[in-house]
Image (tube, helix red, strand yellow):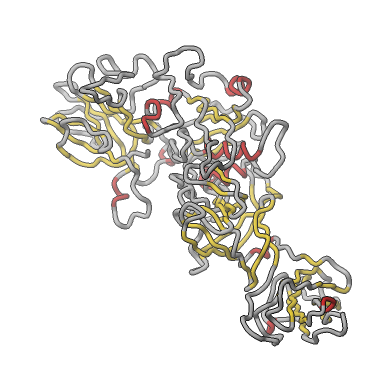
Amino acid sequence: MRSVRVVVVVVASLFVPALAACVVEEELGEAEQLGTLNQGTLNQGTLNQGTLNQGTLNQGSQDGVWGVTLAGWSNSGMALTATGVSAGKLAATWHKSPACGGPNTSPMRTCDWYGGGVVTCAAGATVSVAAGACAAGVRSMVRVCAGAKPCAATAALAASDAACAGAANPTVSFRCPAVGSYFAMVAPKNVGLPAPFPYTVKPTPTATVRRTLGGAQFDGTTFDGVLGVAPDGALIRYRVVGRGAATLATGALDPFTDLYRIVEDADGTTPLCAGADNRAVPLTGRWRGDGTFVDSSTHVTLACRIGVIAKCYLHGYRPWAAGPPGASMRDLHQTCTRAARADFCGDGTSYTVTGTPIDLYDRFNVSAPVADGKPLEAIWAREGTGETSGENSYGRAPVCLSKRRWDSMPYEGGGLCPGLTNDPRVDNGEPGSARYCEDSAAAWFAENPDNVIATDSGTNGAGLWRWKKIVGVDYRTTAACTTTGPDACQAGYLFGKQLEVFGYEPPREPVFLGGMYPPDQPADLLPENAIPLYTLRHLTTGEHLTTTDATFPGYGPGTLDGYILDDSCEETSATVPCPAKRLDLVYKDGDYLTTTPLEPVLGYTGYVKTLGYLLY
């Protein structure tokens, strides 16, 4: 997966799947393990934490968590208000515990208490605090807790229900606890009073009373994640169980960002984010399954570090920050999420293989290029963010792709990539027509100010193509032939043609079947269920056969064509669904053909076996 950071979305009322906008810690997990996310290098992959599955934007162990609602947050039995994200950290203010629902004047009660705030003090010193709303004529009570959170009456440092002495609030004196802070709780003596309860908290000696939460105070905070596309999905309760500092792609600590460990509240163990370091970085807004960002006043995103939302954030694109002149950090971050997961169609689908190392940089040098010899892969245009009539129209496919990358993509999108229509392999070559990424990134940046991000790629996926002979019905399925040159495969095969037969216009030849790992893929970047795919040639007829068998009766020894995934995903115990593209070996009159059920060939109805699954 491209090493980019992933983020989970927290919504004021929901969580979203697929893009799985859950906030997960830097999506640097895989890159860090492989040591490739250095000097600005990112590993290409899906936007899920594991894959940003919005198609591939899912980040986390809980498939389909797409955000966190901003409504319904609580901590220590007290509701929180003003919830959200502020500059890379969760934000909230103490509010109150649930209403009593009936008369209750007991100072021991757990209901109808307000969070007065936390006060720092000198450990062991005698301090006092007066709290209440007596000046407003409301009889009041006060309770003081050690530390920075509300507590039960039995755990209080001090408490008073002396109501009011004229306009004076009840006051308690005590020794500052060893932790060096105390929390003041305030309540009306009589419950059921009309809001608001205009209380004050006055410590002696004078000190700041902080009602906003910060740092470790967020431990124990619960909120609802949205399963499905927010705001319409079902809700699942999550709880923050830890917090820590963020490390940037450069290895430096990020003073602006806190990372949060989040688990399901029901069992206290099932993590929101996958991986050993299952933390998430918080961002405003939310992401959709097609990869678009939507500014939101009701949801936020908690992005798992293993996903590209977090990776791009920790790579230096802080959406809330002021960028260089002419740069929008929000736009750069969003464009980065497309580039980092190889979303060449601009629809949320990743067109790369897990572990592909990339260098990602921009025209403003927020992230600078790395001189490590990787060839230019793609140029990405600025992607704005917004929402119009429920649909976001700002998604962008790349401005150009390298020849090698085009070899792993269908012609003109093939109906699969609505945004990828600038295909130089079939363009007429006239001025203004589509181009390969053969110029330098600097030249593309200079050509158009909207060209803002470039990616250099060291390893790419391979495209598996089905070639058809010009004469006869012989087919050859292989990733070894290029579609980016005039001598694409070998003489005798159709190239760049569309033939209309009886009013039916078939796909352009050759036919793109899907992506797979190339034969030179490093072994440590292949998953355990990757299996080799070989191309063999018949000893008599010279016809080709592509299969997972290194030897086949009547054929010479095979050459490695690439790697696909085995059929272990079909097992009932599998936790990950099979990719959409199954690769089968079929036959007609003894003639073998390798193709997918999605791309059948007339007459080849004899099923031999399923070879495995293509990556996309």
Relative to 167, is 375 above or below?
above
Residue at 52%, 45% in the rendered image:
390
In terms of depth relative to the viewer, which is nearer, 25 or 401? 401
Residue at x 58% of width, y 46% of height? 310
Is 143 on the left-hand or right-hand side of 54?
Answer: right
Quick check: can you spot residue 547?
yes
Image location of residue 144, percent across then percent down: 76, 78
Query: How far from the left and from the top, in percent, is residue 529?
Result: 34, 46
- The x and y percentages for residue 581 are 32, 40
Q: Nearer the viewer, residue 446 or 43?
A: 446
Looking at the image, residue 48 sits to the left or right of residue 174; the answer is left
Quadrant housing residue 208: bottom right
Of 135 and 400, which appears nearest the observer?
A: 135
Q: Quadrant of residue 566?
A: top left
Quadrant of the frame with the C terminus: top left
Which residue lies most toward the top here? 430
